[in-house]
Image (spheres, rainbow, N blue to C red):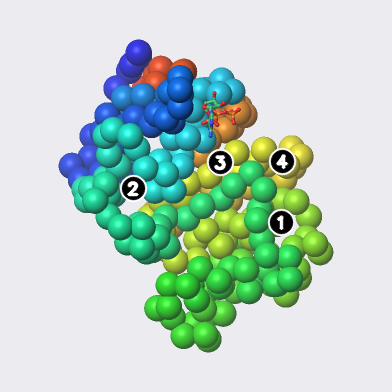
């Protein structure tokens, strides 16, 4: 049920989903996501919330083009994605999307800086020197200038997750998708990572969509899409923004 209108009507939204449905085939099919519709514009900070098993991660995987819907589609900058090949989807992900997961998934044998340059190497648009410069600037911008050459094991949990955020920003994505980005962190590191994501939205003109169980964090984001049983229960702007 929709309790109030989404905050912005955008003519050509960054991300749009129409009648998005994902059913797992089985003797008794499992519906992960059902008839989900919304649009998300630039520089939005959106929480996806809902009870355990409500389909939050499944929805995020569909938004990130890591899984394909059974029905409906995901549009990025107004372009449909359903007919793209695996290779085209991979390129679109590399160029337009950044991912942050609950666990950092940094490569342990590489330094923070090397981890951040990996997506740039894959995209192949910058020289080695440019990659190092951009990687250093991203890490410095996230308060990690002293840790460029440290390996993940030499960093705290919050520092590792901020390196993962810098890696997600490597190719200047329009959209960052985060699945429980603070789920494995203590309260101090949670605050650092949250502030990092908020600053990206404010400064980089990047949209962040984050699945979270943390209702206090969700209420500090600009918009909340709440799922129940794979469906949108409500999609609303933060109250103080609605009333401002
Ligand atoms: N591969 C699978 N096979 C069978 N059921 C699955 C599969 N993947 C997900 N599910 C089920 O689909 C539902 C939605 O899962 P999903 O992980 O998207 O929910 P969630 O809201 O992210 O949950 P949580 O908050 O616990 O991480 C759950 O009931 C889950 O058990």
Q: Are marks 3 and 4 in contact (CB under 8 Å)?
A: no
Which of the image's four quarters has the C terminus? top left
Q: Residue furthest right?
A: 154
Could you say which disc has been placed on residue 184 in the image? 4
Q: Earlier in the sequence, mark 4 or mark 2?
A: 2
Label 1: element kind:
helix
Q: Is mark 3 within 8 Å of ligand 1?
A: yes
Classify 206 as above or below 13.
below
Q: Marks 4 and 2, how far apart in space?
A: 28 Å
Classify 205 as above or below 13.
below
Q: Earlier in the sequence, mark 2 or mark 1?
A: 2
Q: Which residue is mark 2?
A: 42
Q: Marks 1 and 4, how far apart in space?
A: 12 Å
Dividing the picture into quadrants, the one containing residue 21 is top left
Q: Which residue is mark 3?
A: 179
Q: Earlier in the sequence, mark 1 or mark 3?
A: 1
Q: Earlier in the sequence, mark 3 or mark 4?
A: 3
Q: Marks 1 and 3, how far apart in space?
A: 17 Å
Ligand 1's image quarter is top right
Label 4: element kind:
loop
């Amino acid at each position: 049920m929709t309790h109030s209108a989404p905050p912005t009507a955008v003519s050509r939204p960054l991300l749009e989903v129409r009648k998005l449905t994902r059913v797992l085939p089985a003797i008794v099919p499992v519906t992960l996501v059902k008839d989900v519709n919304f649009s998300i514009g630039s520089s939005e900070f959106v929480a996806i919330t809902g009870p355990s098993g409500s389909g939050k991660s499944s929805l995020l995987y569909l938004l990130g083009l890591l899984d394909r819907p059974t029905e409906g589609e995901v549009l990025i900058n107004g372009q449909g994605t359903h007919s793209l090949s695996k290779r085209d989807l991979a390129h679109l992900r590399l160029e337009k999307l950044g991912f942050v997961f609950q666990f950092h998934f940094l490569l342990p044998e590489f330094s923070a800086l090397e981890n951040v340059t990996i997506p740039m190497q894959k995209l192949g648009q910058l020289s080695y020197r440019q990659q190092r410069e951009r990687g250093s600037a991203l890490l410095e911008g996230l308060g990690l200038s002293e840790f460029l050459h440290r390996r993940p094991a030499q960093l705290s949990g919050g520092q590792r997750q901020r390196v993962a955020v810098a890696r997600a920003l490597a190719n200047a994505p329009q959209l960052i998708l985060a699945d429980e980005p603070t789920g494995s962190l203590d309260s101090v590191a949670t605050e650092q990572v949250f502030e990092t994501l908020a600053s990206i939205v404010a400064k980089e003109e990047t949209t962040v969509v984050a699945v979270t169980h943390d209702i206090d964090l969700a209420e500090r984001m600009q918009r909340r899409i709440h799922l129940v049983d794979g469906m949108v229960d409500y999609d609303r702007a933060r109250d103080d923004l609605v009333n401002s």
